[in-house]
Amino acid sequence: MKKDLTPEEKALWQSASSDVKPLAPSLKHPPILATKVSQSPQGVRQQSLQQTNHQSSYQLTNLDSRQLKNIVIDDTLDFHGYQISQVERALARFLQTSQQRSYRWVLMITGKGLHSSENQQGSIKQTIQDLLPRYSQFVVGFSMAKPLHGGGGALYVKIRRLRSWQKK
């Protein structure tokens, strides 16, 4: 049920929002924090992902239909065209960025593997499902997507919140 604002509510809104200015395009997403290491930028990125890969003591939870009922997808990563060798690096970077941007739900499109050779059918999806437990410091859990979002060719991933003591 939609209710129209009263003249008093409209006036209150106008006075409250009169000095609000839109964010600059460069400030719409929070900056991505990098690990302080005296190396080349490529070395910093590689070491940051490797360090986060081994410091997790979290366990993934099973996502049930109640949690998947009204989700809002914050971002999507489509793995179509990726080689198996590229998947882990792209996955780690995407999960870390999603957590730092305070995303809650992301969609990973893996494809169903219908155009892959017989011995590799669905291998990207299986690789991602095998890798997600390693990144449990970023991930709460994951589940197959609804048909609306790709069904068997996509995964919902719930991103773990970044706690204040982790933001340093």
Image (cartoon, rainbow, N blue to C red):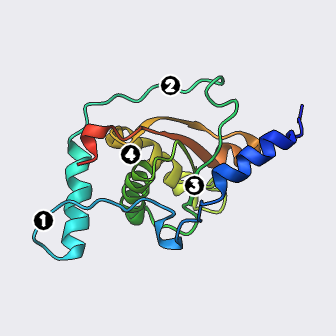
Q: Is residue 109 visible?
A: no
Going from N to C along the chain, the mark reached first, 2 or 4, is: 2
| Element class at badge 1 | loop
> Between tags 2 and 1, which lies in front?
1
Q: Spatial distance from mark 1 to mark 3, Cα to Cα? A: 29 Å
Dot in front, 4 or 1 = 1
56 lies above or below 82: above
Q: Which residue is mark 4?
A: 131
Q: Nearer the viewer, residue 82 or 6?
A: 6
Which structural element holds mark 4?
A: helix
- Seen in the picture, residue 20 relative to 99 is either above or below; the reply is below
Residue 90 picture location, percent across and down: 41, 62
Q: Secondary structure at mark 3?
A: strand
Amino acid type for the residue under numbered disc 4: Leu
Q: Nearer the viewer, mark 3 or mark 2?
A: 3
Marks 3 and 4 sit apart, C-alpha to C-alpha, by 19 Å
Q: Earlier in the sequence, mark 3 or mark 2?
A: 2
**Considering only order in the chain, which callout, 4 or 3, is on the residue closer to the N terminus?**
3
Q: Which residue is mark 3?
A: 75
Mark 1 residue crowding within 10 angstroms, few (<14) / some (14–19) / many (20+): few
| Numbered mark located on residue 37 in the image | 1
Kindly identify the amino acid type of the residue bearing the numbered disc 1.
Answer: Val
Q: Is residue 56 left or right of residue 27?
A: left
Q: Are marks 4 and 1 in contact (CB under 8 Å)?
A: no
Q: Quadrant of residue 94?
A: bottom left
Q: Position of 85 compared to 156: left or right?
A: left
